[in-house]
Amino acid sequence: MKHIEGPPWKIFVRFSTFEEADTKRKELLETEEDLQVKVHWLRSAVHKVFAVKTRLDPAKAPPPARKKNKKRKKRK
């Protein structure tokens, strides 16, 4: 079985506590059907935040558009 990458995750919102982020994650799951949601812990030297990340479900996402090949000019 070949692994296919899905669409990238995007940060929807950041919270300072996990409870707030988890509440928002549950709200998004109830309202949106074709959406995947996760809570990700972001840690830096100064900030410790929880990010709610979202993306379209890879099984239901439209296939990526193919790039058209450009014709090359012949050298004379």
Image (cartoon, helix red, strand yellow):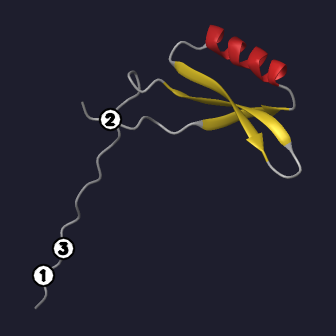
Which numbered mark, 2 or 1, is in the foreground of this view? 2
Residue 13 rendering spot, x and y as whole percentages: 75, 32
Labels 2 and 3: the sequence-earlier one: 2
State the residue in front, 37 or 17. 17
* Image position of 66 with respect to 33: above or below: below
Q: Tags 3 and 1 in contact by the CB under 8 Å rule?
A: yes
The residue that mark 3 highlights is: 72
The three-letter code of the residue at mark 1 reads Lys
Quarter-wise, where is residue 1 in the image? top left
Query: Which residue is pictured at 85% across the width and 52% down the height?
Result: 45
**Badge 1: how crowded within 10 Å, few (<14), some, or many (20+)?**
few
Label 1 sits on a secondary structure element that is loop
Label 2, label 1: how far apart the Cα atoms are = 39 Å
Amino acid type indicated by mark 3: Arg
Q: Earlier in the sequence, mark 2 or mark 1?
A: 2
- Say which element carries label 3: loop
Kind of residue sitting beneath label 2:
His
Residue 74 lies left or right of residue 13; in this view the side is left
Residue drawn at x 18%, y 73% is 72
Residue receiving disc 1:
74
Image vertical order of residue 36 relative to residue 64, above or below: above
Q: Which mark is residue 3?
A: 2
Query: Which corner quadrant of the image does residue 27 belong to?
Result: top right
In the rendered image, residue 26, in percent from the top left (x then y), is placed at 70, 12
x and y percentages locating residue 40 in the rendered image: 69, 32
